[in-house]
Image (spheres, rainbow, N blue to C red):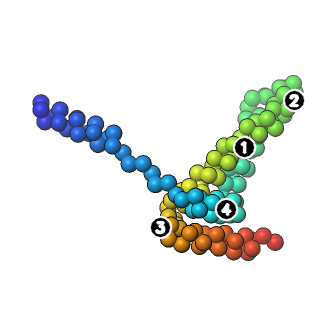
Amino acid sequence: MARRLLIIASMLVFSISTSSAQTPSPEAMTAARSLVTTMKVADPYKAMLPATLMGLRRTLTQDRPEIERDYDAMMPTIEAAFTPYYAAIVDDIATVYANNSRSARCARSSCSTISRSARSFSKNRLP
C-alpha cells in the first residue's frame, strides 16, 4: 500500500514539474517571421477558408435563394474574422522555425544567416 502511494505521489510530482518551451530571441523571431512570409508558408491556410466556406454554402443553403443571399452577404465578415487567426498561424510557424532549425546558430550569429537566406530566396522567387 505504501509503495502504491509512493508511485502515485511521484507521478503527481513529476507531472507538475514540466519544463517550459524555449522562447526564441526577438531577432530570431523577426528573421523567422520574414522568412515564413517570404516563403508564403501559411498561404495554403488562407486559401482553405474560401473552399471550406463554399462547401458549407451548399450544405447550409440547400438551394434556397434567400439563404444564399444572406450567406453571400456574410462571407466578407467571416473572412475578416479569420484574419487574426491567419496572423497567429504565421507567428506559430515562425516560432517553430526559430526554435527548431536555427536556435543555436541564431543566438551566436545574430540571425544573419536567416536574414540572408530570406533575402536571397525572395530575390530568386520574385519576378
Residue 39: quadrant of the picture: bottom right
| Distance Cα–Cα, label 3 vs label 1 | 32 Å
- Residue at image mark 1: 83
Question: Disc 4 marks which amino acid?
Answer: Ser
Q: Residue at x 50, y 64 (%)?
A: 103
Residue 60: x and y in percent read: 75, 29
Label 4 belongs to which residue? Answer: 34
Please provide percent x and percent y for residue 95: 56, 55
Residue 51 visible to an observer of this rendering: yes
Secondary structure beneath dot 4 equals helix
Residue picked out by circle 2 = 69
Instruction: Identify the image quadrant of residue 41.
Output: bottom right
Label 2 sits on a secondary structure element that is helix
Q: CA distance from mark 2 to mark 4?
A: 39 Å
Any mark on residue 104, and which? 3
Q: Earlier in the sequence, mark 2 or mark 4?
A: 4
Q: Is residue 119 left or right of residue 27?
A: right
| Disc 3 secondary structure class | helix
The quarter of the picture where the C terminus appears is bottom right
Between label 2 and label 4, give the one nearer the viewer: 4
